[in-house]
Image (cartoon, helix red, strand yellow):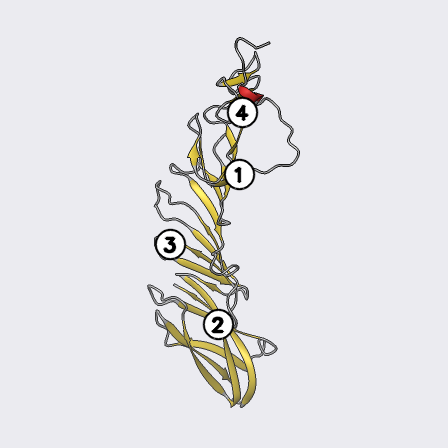
Amino acid sequence: MTFRNPILGAGGSTLLRPAIQSPNYLTGSTGWAIKRDGSAEFNNVVIRGGTVVSGLALYYDGTPASGNLIMSVSATAGTDAFGNDYPAGLMVQDSSGRRSQLDSLGTIRITDLTQWDNGASLSVQAPLSAFGLSTILQSATNDSPPGDAAAALVLDPGTAGTNGTAQFTSPGTGVEVDLDVSGNLTAKNIQVGTTVFAMVAVTQMDVAVTFPQAFDTVPRIAATLRGSVAGSTALIVKSFNVTTTGMTLRVTDVGGVARTLTINADWHAIA
């Protein structure tokens, strides 16, 4: 007996009709459908094992529609049938548009689209050429007042012989603030540091200091001695020859005693 309107072709392995579907099938809503082009739609599926090859996974909060795409996994960026854009990689977002993203290069981006008119974003990046060399967190450009300069944070563990630093900077303006693991702060208008005096049988010693960044105006200097002699009235530290680029620090034994010791002087420069 032959069906007058067959579903499958010869051998029972070829779907003749454009699709087979449940009576209640409604795209994106109810029922199920298996289409001849290889696509399918189901209401609830349990899959045990398997492999996804060049697949696109889109997750919605309720019935798929504009504005309710909450998660995507895709090899390339695109836009769904409802106008929701999705990036390459893994993306999750809430209904207000706050988005987190992980791409194939290992870059993590956390975006709050509601803060500024063109979006405020935070990204964490590890250069592939030197893993661990630095971590960069950078905001998007802000077109709203008071300015349009982005902000960035670079966490650098440093190299042999140097301290790790946290660098706060504005790539657009070049303004930078550095804080290293020893607590040394370097900024455009506030800079701090430590100068080492290795005194050998002398009553006085001068050390030239170059500021990490040049000041716009000559800064004021405050310097103190650190260590076991910090509270001694016999040793004092003073600054002189202060310019926008550096100064000289002098440690003196006010009693005229020749000293052999190593002592640190902490200094603050404020313009």
Disc 3 to disc 4, C-alpha distance: 48 Å
| Mark 3 secondary-structure assignment | loop
Disc 2 to disc 4, C-alpha distance: 74 Å
| Residue under the image location 57 percent in, 10 percent down | 2
Comes first in the chain, label 3 or label 4 = 4
Res. 175 in view: yes
Disc 2 to disc 3, C-alpha distance: 32 Å
Disc 1 residue type?
Answer: Val
- What mark, if any, has residue 53 been given in the picture? 1
The nearer-to-camera label among 1 and 2 is: 1
Disc 1 to disc 2, C-alpha distance: 65 Å
Comes first in the chain, label 1 or label 2 = 1
Disc 3 to disc 1, C-alpha distance: 40 Å
- What mark, if any, has residue 171 been given in the picture? 3
Quarter of the figure with the N terminus: top right
- What mark, if any, has residue 40 been given in the picture? 4
Left or right relative to 123: residue 261: right
Q: Which residue is mark 2?
A: 223
10 Å crowding of disc 2: few (<14), some (14-19), many (20+): many
| Residue under the image location 44 percent in, 36 percent down | 113
Disc 2 residue type?
Answer: Ala
